[in-house]
Amino acid sequence: MALVHQATLSPTKLELVTAYLDSVPWGGTGEVEMIGGYRFDDPAGEVGVEALLVSRDDRSLHIPLTYRGAPLPEADEFLVSTMTHSVLGDRWIYEAAADPVAVDCFVRALRGRQEQARLEIQSSDGSVTIQEPPVRIRLEGAPADATALALSDDLASPVSGAAWLVAEWDGGAGVVAALR
């Protein structure tokens, strides 16, 4: 289960994602609306692995990220932003495709060996409630000998492969990852 703290983030996730989309060629223009997200648990419990789904220019976009407590060595070009988290302190946010922890999580999920995380929401008084994620993923296909991970960015042009993860949310669905 992914422990999510009720915290103040600076920048907010929406601000972070908007700035990131403004910096990539496929990011579009205009207002960004958050659809939701899904998470994977890092078996070591050190790295947050989250994929956010947003809408921009009438397109559904997939932004897989990792959250780290320290910089990822030799990955400066994949640094999306830094963030101050009121509970966890400074965080370094990377493109998930460049983070070995996230890649391993996606590959395990595509091989049927890792489920998406349920969310444990910890409030400021320390109480914890369980919440179903707003985006659900399911595995389709069979990976066979496939070894290469591909992640979708614009869900109108999804990746394909021997096995794929489909994200579903109220009002939509799309392929977010594949093993080729």
Image (cartoon, rainbow, N blue to C red):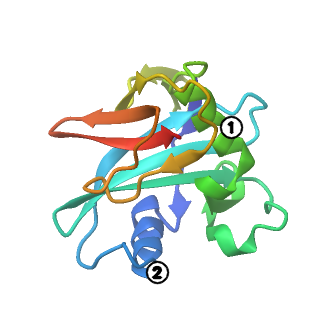
* Relative horizontal placement of residue 1, taking residue 101 as reference (left or right): left
Q: Residue 85: image x %, image y %?
A: 62, 56
* Relative horizontal placement of residue 26, taking residue 106 as reference (left or right): left
- Earlier residue among tags 2 and 1: 2
Q: Kindly identify the residue that appears in the image at 53 percent across and 44 percent down.
A: 50
Q: Residue furthest right?
A: 73
Reply above or below: 130 against 93. Answer: above
In the image, what residue type sits under mark 1? Asp
Towards the viewer: 15 or 61? 61
In the rendered image, which residue does mark 1 sit on? 104
Position of the N terminus, as image quadrant, is top right
Neighbour tally class for label 1: few under 14, some 14-19, many 20 plus, Cα within 10 Å: some
Q: Kindly identify the residue that appears in the image at 61 percent across and 65 percent down.
A: 83
Q: Residue 137: image x %, image y %?
A: 39, 29
On the question of residue 126 being in view, the answer is no
What secondary structure is found at the residue carrying circle 1? helix
Given contact means CB atoms under 8 Å apart, are the residues at marks 2 and 1 in contact?
A: no
Neighbour tally class for label 2: few under 14, some 14-19, many 20 plus, Cα within 10 Å: few
